[in-house]
Structures are given as structure tokens and as C-alpha cells.
């Protein structure tokens, strides 16, 4: 039994939130217009997010598939001020994820030696799932941007004019807000397409930070409660309506070298990431990339990420932004 939240625009263009169980029709929440607002109400009431949503799910039924097709579904979490939502993530966290990354970097090092990617992966295997009360090894970490980089479900992923590649990364993302006293509240989990420039990263591992500064997507639905240990999904790339690349992906702790709690700890251990009122979207990594199979994406391609129990699939179209000048002047 899965409960999920969705942010959307109603037929009058007003923001709203809906709750549904499994594949039933969703029901609009009354007394709130955003997930962020709902979470604040739950914190103030001392309730968990599901209980708060159930208490307010007294509005009309909502056809989420129709809303998605009409472009009215929003990311499942945003912030009134984009600058106060941080999007970041961790890599080399999944069993098998080192293989794809190692392929990218093997030609940059002596073949007789392990790459930095494989060493980082092995650290996770050996110390990424610590005993209760212990702190595990810290993972690879990267910054993607603020709330402005979140594309809508079924919206466009706009690759910048200087990008060398635009490739999908099917992932699970954790969604969080920070309470008034600095306590971090996990709202739930969403499907994600972390979207990166793998050609830029392949040039030199030190370009990883550049390769991650891209738009991305989460949603359409926010899964409440615990994340199942074994997530089995599928990633597809469609070109002119036809599937041109497809592959299953695995996630959840049973398929990871790090515990989710360890990834969360090493993100939120920094004081600057526990600023009251802020929101966070944190990608947990992937093991499956079309780039690792030698596939080249093209503008117009549609990425689709789907997995139970997340409900509706996440689809986004790749768009290449036109060239434009970067104006820098002394003042």
C-alpha cells in the first residue's frame, strides 16, 4: 500500500496538492496549496506528513494522468524562494555503479592501477552501511543548483549551449525541509532524472562539478513513508515516439553500497544545510546510464523513468539551448 502526494495546477491555474493511495483517484487537499506549506502544518501539529494529508484530503477528486498530460503537474516539492531550495546528490552509491564510471575514466589512468572511481566505490562497499549509532564512510557528493533548475514532470530538460552531452540518470531522490530549530524532516521520496553532461565529465574527473550543473527533474509523485529496500524500475529513451534505448535499473538499500541514513548524515552534517526554512532535494545515485552503453542522445529525445511504487512515470524532453553571449563587465 503506497500513499503519494502530487503538486499541480487546477483547471483555473491555482496551485494545489492531492493525495492518493496506490492507483486510486487522487483527492485534493483543503487548507493548503503546496507540499512545503503542508509540511509546515504537519510539523506545527506534531503529525507525520501522511496523517496531515489524510486529514485535509476532503476536496474533489483529481485525474492526475490528465493533469500531467496537460502540463499542470509541478515538481512534488518546491520553495517560495528558489534560492532556499538546494539540489545536490551522491554518486558511486549503487552496486554496479562503479562499472559505468570506471569505463569513463579508465583511459585517464594507468590500466594497472585502480581509478579514483573504483577506490571510492570500494570505500562505500567496506564502510557505507555502518552499525546503528555509528558513522559510515562519506560518499562522493556534488551540487547541482537551487530550486530554479527543477523542471516540471513532462517538461523540458534544457541543456546549456556550451554542453557537450545531455544524458539521463535515473535515480531516487529524498525530499526534505528544515524546521525552525534546525531539525531535518524527510518528507518522502520521488523518482528523479538527475541529468548530467557525461562527455564533459569523461574529459577529466575534475570536471565532475561542471558536468553536474544542469537542470534535472523529480516526480510526478512524492512517495510517503519508508523507501522499499528493493526498487526495480525501467529507463527508456524515445525518439519520434519509438523506443531507441531501454534498460532496467535497481535502487533501494538492497542494491546500494551505502545506507540512506549514511548519505543523509554526510549531507546534513554541514551547518549550512540545516538552515531553518530551507528545502532540499537529494539524489541518491544510479547504476544505469545510456552513456555507458555508447548511446548518444539528441535534442527532442524523451527520457522516461518508471518504477513501482512511485505511480506515474517521470518523462522529460531534451532541448538544446541556443548560443548566447555571457556578459561580464567591470563596474
Image: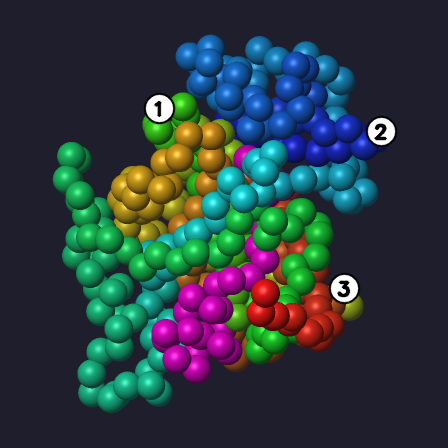
Q: Is residue 259 left or right of residue 130?
A: right
Query: Residue 241 — which label?
Result: 3
At a point 36% along the width and 36% down the height, the residue shown is 274
**Distance of mark 2 from mark 3, alpha carbons?**
31 Å
Between marks 2 and 1 in the image, the one whose residue lies nearer the viewer: 1
**Distance of mark 2 from mark 1, alpha carbons?**
37 Å
**In terms of secondary structure, where does tag 3 sit?**
loop
Q: Position of residue 54 (x, y in %)?
A: 57, 15
At a point 72% along the width and 29% down the height, the residue shown is 15
Please tell me which of labels 1 and 3 falls first in the chain: 1
Crowding around mark 2 (Cα neighbors within 10 Å: few <14, some 14 to 19, many 20+) is: few
* Magenta-highlighted residues: 198-222
Report if residue 12 is visible in the image.
yes
Closest to the observer: 300 or 276? 276
Between marks 2 and 3 in the image, the one whose residue lies nearer the viewer: 2
**Distance of mark 1 from mark 3, alpha carbons?**
49 Å
Crowding around mark 1 (Cα neighbors within 10 Å: few <14, some 14 to 19, many 20+) is: few
Between marks 1 and 3 in the image, the one whose residue lies nearer the viewer: 1
Query: Residue 12 — which label?
Result: 2
Query: Is residue 309 located in the magenta-colored stretch of the structure?
Result: no
**In terms of secondary structure, where does tag 1 sit?**
loop
Q: Is residue 166 above or below residue 45?
A: below
Q: Position of residue 30 (x, y in %)?
A: 68, 15
Q: Is residue 95 above or below residue 258?
A: below
CB within 8 Å, label 2 to label 3: no
Query: Residue 181 — which label?
Result: 1
At a point 28% along the width and 56% down the height, the residue shown is 139
Closest to the observer: 124 or 227? 124
Q: Is residue 21 left or right of residue 64?
A: left
Amino acid at each position: 500500500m503506497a500513499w503519494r502526494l502530487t503538486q499541480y495546477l487546477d483547471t483555473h491555474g491555482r496551485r494545489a496538492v492531492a493525495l492518493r493511495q496506490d492507483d486510486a483517484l487522487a483527492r485534493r487537499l483543503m487548507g493548503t496549496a503546496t507540499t512545503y506549506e503542508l509540511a509546515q502544518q504537519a510539523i506545527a501539529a506534531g503529525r507525520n506528513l501522511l496523517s496531515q494529508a489524510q486529514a485535509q484530503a476532503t476536496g474533489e477528486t483529481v485525474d492526475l494522468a490528465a493533469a500531467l498530460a496537460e502540463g499542470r503537474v509541478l515538481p512534488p516539492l518546491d520553495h517560495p524562494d528558489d534560492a532556499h531550495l538546494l539540489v545536490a546528490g551522491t554518486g558511486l552509491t549503487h552496486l554496479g555503479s562503479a562499472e559505468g564510471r570506471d569505463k569513463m575514466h579508465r583511459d585517464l589512468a594507468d590500466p594497472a592501477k585502480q581509478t579514483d572511481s573504483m577506490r571510492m566505490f570500494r570505500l562505500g562497499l567496506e564502510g557505507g552501511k555502518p552499525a546503528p549509532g555509528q558513522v559510515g564512510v562519506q560518499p562522493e557528493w556534488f551540487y547541482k543548483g537551487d530550486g530554479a533548475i527543477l523542471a516540471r514532470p513532462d517538461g523540458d530538460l534544457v541543456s546549456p549551449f556550451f554542453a557537450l552531452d545531455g544524458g539521463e540518470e535515473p535515480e531516487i531522490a529524498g525530499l526534505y525541509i528544515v524546521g525552525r530549530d534546525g531539525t531535518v524532516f524527510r518528507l518522502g521520496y520521488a523518482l528523479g532524472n538527475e541529468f548530467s553532461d557525461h562527455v564533459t565529465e569523461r574529459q577529466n574527473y575534475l570536471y565532475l562539478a561542471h558536468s553536474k550543473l544542469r537542470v534535472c527533474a523529480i516526480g510526478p509523485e512524492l512517495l510517503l513513508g519508508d523507501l522499499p529496500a528493493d526498487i526495480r524500475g525501467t529507463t527508456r529513451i524515445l525518439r519520434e515516439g519509438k523506443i531507441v534505448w531501454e534498460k532496467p535499473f535497481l535502487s533501494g538499500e538492497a542494491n546500494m553500497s551505502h545506507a540512506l541514513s549514511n548519505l543523509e548524515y554526510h549531507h546534513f552534517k554541514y551547518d549550512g544545510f540545516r538552515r531553518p526554512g530551507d528545502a532540499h532535494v537529494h539524489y541518491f545515485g544510479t547504476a544505469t546510464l545510456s552513456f555507458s552503453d555508447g548511446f548518444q542522445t539528441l535534442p527532442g529525445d524523451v527520457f522516461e523513468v518508471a518504477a513501482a511504487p512511485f505511480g506515474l512515470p517521470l518523462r522529460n524532453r531534451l532541448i538544446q539551448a541556443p548560443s548566447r553571449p555571457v556578459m561580464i563587465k567591470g563596474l
